[in-house]
């Protein structure tokens, strides 16, 4: 048998000439080459050469300038609040990313730590118990208590993985909600009277009403009382946590978390104490969530149970998964996209809705984006889009010619009147066929039927393939526009908003399962 | 003779009614290369799982350098100096080649999470050392795991390179004894030959004591100081390759017939 074949002499070549065509390295780098081709590739290649710290600093400065911009608008306070809430969600997404993204632990009890932070701060800085400690003392205390609680709750579940861990931690999260909503009548086994205590039960959490009149952040006599102050406090928290987590991710502990995520047994065989690492990941996430909780309590000047329920947890999960689990930038981007674009952008009658035309930009833009992202080749996409436009115009002309009812009704929202004029309004009016009295009361029944028909059409779409699917897609998209304009545009502040968020997420995640910035994972090869 | 590095004394392990390992005695001396052979299901991998703490023996004792390993969790046993590779490759597939090796340095680095975040001197020093260690362990395989491969995810590696990376990862735990579970499985003849030479090099250059499970008799012949044959969890032969390979009980275990009947 011959010796090991020598490697090709040119295996180690200088950077400029690159590997020989056909060699292992050349094959392995084919992805890089195609990624760096074309204009987009060249731009992204030069972006990659910029030091990461400089990019980070640039975005921090950019975020810090948001209040200066919002001060120029008439709705300074509103935009500051949206910014603060978005940053708060970014903080929560970063914390959740430690357990879910790094260590791969499906921790559904995460929301409890957010709540512990808020209630902890509320109890120690409000009239509730007459304790008014300063924020510099309460914040570290609450964060440490929450981290310890994270350890404690992770302790019984440290041997569980996957679905089992999810169920147990969800249970802990629910317990927190129940304890908080029922915590207004706490007694010692119902024996308070028999024990001669001063009252039959105590009110600890305020129950469903929560704790109101919570103090503002007070650092050594300096009180943060304006929206602007909370924006900056939250921004500083996000920056510090982001930097800390990205350093943690690159440390031996970060590597061990990722190893544990890939293969817990192998990680253990390679000298990593997996149980301790799990506790550490959940504890660190709990600390970040508690920090966010204290900020939220001081911002709202109260702690209310419904800010810490499972619905909020699911939204934070949506942010982490949309951004790409395991990616810190992804967590922040996911939080900003979901909160600003989807949750606030879809809400009608807000200052932001003037800019999004009551969420129309989000909905039509979302549909268009999905079509562009999923339909190949370009010819097919072009044909479908042309078909959608032609179909709409034809329907509009037919309806306008055949009924005396009118076909140009469109909701007029905000100071920018797309209903009466404006090019978007003009386009929508001539594409859809909306009755003149669309928004008058008593005209709901046909629109409800349209919504049901839309749902049926979408379901049928999933069963079809090939040209039939393309053909059916045309009336479906048109009907989606019709249903949005006649029904959902008014209702988007309620649960409809979350349904739309869910629909958008399903489509985005189908097109890009690893999330916006995540790397595709390989589980078993 | 000095104390053996690894010593199994009457180790037994049963799963339900199945006696996987039955009163097994085994010693491995410092600097030795010992091969474990046996038919499928003989209990070879179970033996490795017992030594590395994945399973706890029902009876008997496992000693490393005179100290018992029984009852210690796997990561503690690895920190004491026992590292293994897996028959069914278990790399950290989504981590880069270099990170796979660096991750295994966890056991002999000390910097806490706080130190790493604050980049205190100890964390920075350990990080530098871990980098150097990974480069050193990967360079053991010539150019195969070097250069551009460092930053590639482990899942992009070929099968043979995955086996090599497993060995590199195991050595990064700074073990005294390496347990290699079928290092040549699924390799072509050239690669198998390379592995045979590599195991010798691991002892010479790395100073590791090696316990290896192997089916390929050419490899076993090429590397072993001593061969141990087990079947149904019982040691049926022990000695040099020639002694074990011609032992009638070993032939019977593999071929299902007695040597007498065959001749």
Image (cartoon, grey):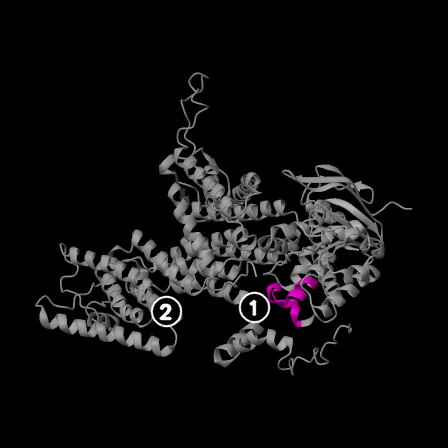
- Pointer 2 chain: A
Image location (x, y in percent) of residue B193? 76, 67
Give the prevailing secondary structure in the magenta stretch. helix
Give the position of the N terminus of chain A as an image quadrant. Answer: bottom right
Q: Which residue lies at the image location 41% right of the left edge and 25% below the top edge?
A: A201
Image location (x, y in percent) of residue B132? 74, 63
Image location (x, y in percent) of residue A87? 45, 56
In this rendered view, identify the residue nearer to me: B171 or A444: B171
Above or below, comparing residue B57 to residue A483 in the picture? above
Q: Which residue is mark 1?
A: A54
Q: Which residue is mark 2?
A: A369
Give the magenta-colored segment's residue range. B148-164
- Label 2 near label 1: C-beta < 8 Å? no
Q: Which residue lies at the image location 41% right of the left edge and 22% below the top edge?
A: A199
Give the position of the C terminus of chain A as an image quadrant. Answer: bottom right
Disc 1 element: helix
Q: Quadrant of residue A478?
A: bottom left
Above or below, comparing residue A300 to residue B124 in the picture? above
Question: How many residues crowd mark 1 within 10 Å: few (<14), some (14–19), many (20+)?
Answer: few
Disc 2 element: helix
Question: How many residues crowd mark 2 within 10 Å: few (<14), some (14–19), many (20+)?
Answer: few
């Amino acid at each position: 048998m011959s010796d090991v074949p020598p490697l090709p002499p040119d295996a180690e070549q200088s950077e400029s000439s690159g590997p020989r065509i056909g060699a292992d390295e050349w094959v392995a780098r084919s992805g890089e080459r195609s990624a760096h081709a074309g204009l987009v590739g060249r731009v992204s290649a030069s972006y990659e050469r910029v030091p990461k710290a400089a990019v980070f600093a640039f975005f921090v400065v950019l975020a810090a300038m948001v209040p200066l911009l919002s001060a120029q608008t008439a709705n300074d306070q509103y935009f500051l609040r949206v910014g603060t809430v978005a940053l708060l969600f970014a903080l929560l997404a970063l914390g959740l990313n430690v357990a879910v993204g790094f260590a791969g632990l499906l921790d559904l009890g995460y929301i409890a730590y957010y709540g512990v932070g808020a209630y902890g701060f509320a109890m120690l800085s409000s009239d509730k118990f007459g304790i008014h400690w300063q924020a510099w003392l309460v914040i570290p205390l609450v964060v440490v208590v929450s981290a310890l609680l994270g350890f404690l709750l992770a302790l019984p579940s440290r041997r569980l993985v996957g679905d089992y861990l999810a169920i147990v931690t969800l249970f802990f999260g629910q317990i927190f909600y129940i304890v908080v909503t029922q915590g207004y009548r706490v007694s010692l086994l119902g024996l308070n009277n028999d024990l001669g205590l001063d009252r039959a039960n105590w009110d600890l959490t305020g129950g469903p009403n929560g704790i109101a009149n919570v103090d503002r952040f007070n650092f050594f006599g300096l009180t943060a009382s304006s929206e602007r102050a909370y924006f900056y406090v939250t921004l500083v928290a996000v920056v510090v946590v982001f930097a800390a987590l990205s350093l943690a991710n690159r440390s031996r502990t970060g590597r061990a978390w990722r190893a544990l995520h890939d293969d817990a047994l192998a990680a253990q065989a390679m000298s990593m104490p997996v149980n301790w690492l799990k506790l550490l990941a959940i504890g660190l996430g709990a600390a970040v969530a508690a920090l966010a909780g204290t900020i939220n309590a001081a911002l709202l000047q109260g702690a209310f149970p419904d800010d810490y329920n499972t619905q909020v947890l699911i939204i934070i999960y949506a942010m982490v998964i949309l951004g790409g689990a395991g990616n810190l930038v992804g967590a922040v981007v996911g939080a900003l996209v979901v909160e600003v674009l989807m949750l606030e952008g879809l809400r009608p009658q807000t200052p932001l809705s003037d800019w999004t035309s009551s969420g129309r930009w989000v909905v039509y833009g979302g549909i268009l984006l999905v079509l562009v992202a999923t339909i190949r080749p370009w010819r097919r996409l072009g044909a479908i889009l042309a078909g959608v436009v032609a179909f709409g115009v034809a329907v509009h002309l037919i309806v306008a010619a055949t009924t005396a009812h009118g076909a140009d009704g469109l909701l007029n929202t905000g100071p920018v009147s797309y209903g009466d004029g404006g090019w978007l309004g003009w386009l929508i009016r001539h594409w859809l066929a909306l009755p003149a009295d669309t928004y008058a009361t008593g005209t709901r029944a046909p629109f409800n039927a349209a919504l049901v028909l839309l749902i049926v059409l979408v379901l049928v779409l999933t069963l079809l393939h090939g040209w039939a699917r393309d053909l059916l897609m045309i009336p479906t998209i048109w009907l989606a526009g019709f249903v949005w304009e006649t029904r959902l545009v008014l209702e988007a502040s309620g649960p409809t908003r979350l349904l739309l968020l869910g629909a958008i997420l399903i489509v985005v995640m189908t097109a890009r399962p690893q999330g916006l910035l995540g790397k595709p994972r390989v589980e078993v090869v | 003779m000095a104390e053996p590095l690894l010593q199994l004394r009457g180790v037994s392990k049963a799963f339900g009614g199945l006696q996987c390992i039955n009163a097994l005695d085994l010693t491995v001396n410092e600097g030795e290369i010992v091969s474990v052979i046996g038919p499928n299901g003989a209990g070879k991998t179970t033996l490795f799982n017992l030594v590395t703490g994945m399973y706890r023996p029902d009876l008997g004792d496992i000693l490393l350098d005179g100290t018992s390993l029984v009852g210690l969790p796997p990561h503690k046993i690895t920190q004491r100096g026992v590292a293994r590779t897996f028959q069914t490759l278990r790399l950290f597939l989504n981590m880069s080649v270099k990170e796979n090796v660096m991750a295994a340095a966890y056991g002999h680095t000390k910097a806490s999470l706080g130190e790493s975040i604050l980049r205190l001197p100890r964390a920075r020093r350990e990080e530098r050392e871990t980098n150097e260690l990974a480069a050193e362990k990967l360079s053991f395989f010539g150019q195969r795991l070097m250069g551009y491969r460092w930053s590639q995810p482990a899942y992009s590696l070929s099968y043979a390179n995955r086996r090599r990376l497993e060995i590199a990862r195991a050595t990064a735990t700074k073990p005294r004894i390496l347990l290699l579970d079928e290092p040549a499985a699924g390799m072509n003849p050239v690669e198998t030959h390379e592995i045979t030479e590599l195991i010798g090099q691991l002892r010479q250059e790395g100073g590791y004591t090696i316990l290896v499970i192997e089916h390929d008799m050419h490899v076993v012949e090429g590397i072993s100081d001593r061969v141990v044959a087990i079947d149904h969890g019982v040691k049926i032969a022990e000695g040099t390759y020639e002694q074990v390979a011609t032992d009638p009980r070993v032939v019977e275990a593999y071929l299902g017939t007695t040597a007498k009947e065959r001749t």
